[in-house]
Amino acid sequence: MTSKTILNDTHRALGAKMVDFGGWDMPIHYGSQIEEHHQVRRDAGMFDVSHMTVVDLRGGQVRPFLRRLVANSVDKLLKPGKALYTCMLNAQGGVIDDLIVYYLAEDWFRLVVNAATRDKDLAWIVAQAEPFGIGVAERPELSMIAVQGPTARERVLGLLGDADAARTGKLVKFSAAELPGTAFGDLFVARTGYTGEDGFEIVVPEAHAVALWNALLEAGVKPAGLGARDTLRLEAGMNLYGQDMDESVTPYEAALGWTVALDEGRAFNGRDALERQQRDGVPRQMIGLVMDEKGVLRHGQKVLTAQGEGEILSGTFSPTIGKAIAFARVPAGDVSGGVRVDIRGREVPVRVARFPFVRDGAAL
Amino acid sequence: MSEIPGDLKFLKSHEWARVEGDGKVTIGISDHAQGLLGDLVYVELPAVGDSIEAGNACAVVESVKAASDVYAPVSGTVTAVNAALADKPETINEDAYGEGWLFVVEASEPDQLNDMLGPDDYAELLEDDGH
């Protein structure tokens, strides 16, 4: 059974081409994926991300629970509203999912996890939470709209009352505010995103989601599909769960070492395995690739290095750079001289590049 | 979806062929095919002088989403390729039956064209695909 967000009819009325995405009927584009991509880089676009899973954790022991659940340290979250990107790991250090943790109050943290991993995530979280006696509540009645791009913030602020706009305008990156009783109901606005652009992710009650979407449209924010979301996030050097990492991969093998905090005395799931890997050496690495030749790097293509074979994880055509870009997982070792990629039987030399590939709307 | 021109013939795999006044055959992909692929970003064409064989892959069109082989509807020798597509592959999205043509073949076995679908049969095929 395919799930639909409350905006499904709205997408169709806007001419969206719909596809199945992890069991959800979602817009891949509204005409041109590349135009939507540029719209977000140059102005402002919005994405229906209501398929993502919002989970509220409540109780006195939430922080101790999160210290165990995730590999980054929630003790970095000092001010209510602050957010943290992290992975939750299994005992082997494999990534169960990546997620954002929002600290709202000492007895209330909010998680936003991926849609495709919803069932296993909830089962894992509930099982792990049991000894801590906390409440785990999914919030399926909440929708989510990501508004992204250099003009996204001002366009959103224009829809809010003066006091709310002032508060929201002051949000620093990677933090959120609750805005109760707006014209669109009780909102939760976070200065986060998955495009490399500034903007907000807005959690809105389902009953108000269509009105908010239409108001944004009226304010000049154009709809963008999951296709553009994918090319934008890859340009921004952001991982996609299931493609760039999964339970067979540790954060160190997925270029997510920066999200791991080996802080003193904190026993989190997977820590032993990570420390072992640090000690013995990480066998694989995730690298960024840019292809100067024509063609497109794609998931599953074989990558040849001096140390052995690897494969393309996420690969696409970068509309901003005008070349193919990709993540690849390859054996550890020096690849600064470049690698070769097998594209339909042809071995094409490909440059190893730092990522993000694009920052502030421009190629790096 | 744009109107399917009446002078085209089609393969089930969504290539089109048009017999020009000089007997040569222009090949492209259908408007339906470009719609399925989405924004095209790269086209790999045969070279002028190449021999191609009906039913074999002889070009590649790549969109952001996928790479797709283009099959030759007729055998023959390539006499021209649409070099403008190298810089503007999106021309195929904009005008699949006109400026977005791929290459031209001097057909060695013109009868092969008779095996292709007419515009009405192709339109019916698309409907049967169940939209």
Image (cartoon, coloured by chain):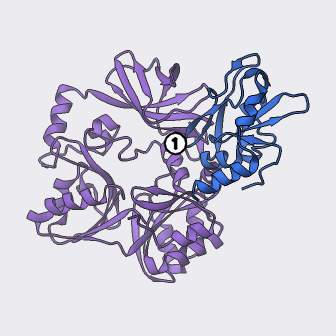
Is residue A309 shown left or right of residue A353?
Answer: left
Residue A58 visible? The answer is yes
Q: Which residue is mark 1?
A: A235
Residue B80 visible? The answer is no
| Residue B62: image location, x then y, percent | 61, 36
Is residue B124 shown left or right of residue A110?
Answer: right
| Residue A27: image location, x then y, percent | 53, 60
Say which quadrant the N terminus of chain B sits in: bottom right
| Residue in the picture at 70% in, 53% down | B123
Q: Which residue lies most toward the left here?
A: A131
Q: Amino acid at mark 1?
A: Glu
For the colour blue, the matching chain is: B
For the colour purple, the matching chain is: A
Is residue A188 shown left or right of residue A90?
Answer: right
**Element type at marker 1?**
helix
Q: Is residue A15 above or below residue A184?
A: above
Is residue A55 shown left or right of residue B37?
Answer: left
| Residue B88: image location, x then y, percent | 74, 37
| Residue A112: image location, x then y, percent | 34, 61
Corner quadrant of residue A52: bottom left
Q: Is residue A124 above or below residue A293?
A: below
Query: Which is more toward the observer, B48 or A225?
Result: B48
Say which quadrant the C terminus of chain B sits in: bottom right
Q: Label 1 lies in what chain?
A: A
| Residue in the picture at 40% in, 46% down | A240
Q: Which residue lies most toward the right here?
A: B21
Corner quadrant of residue A222: bottom right
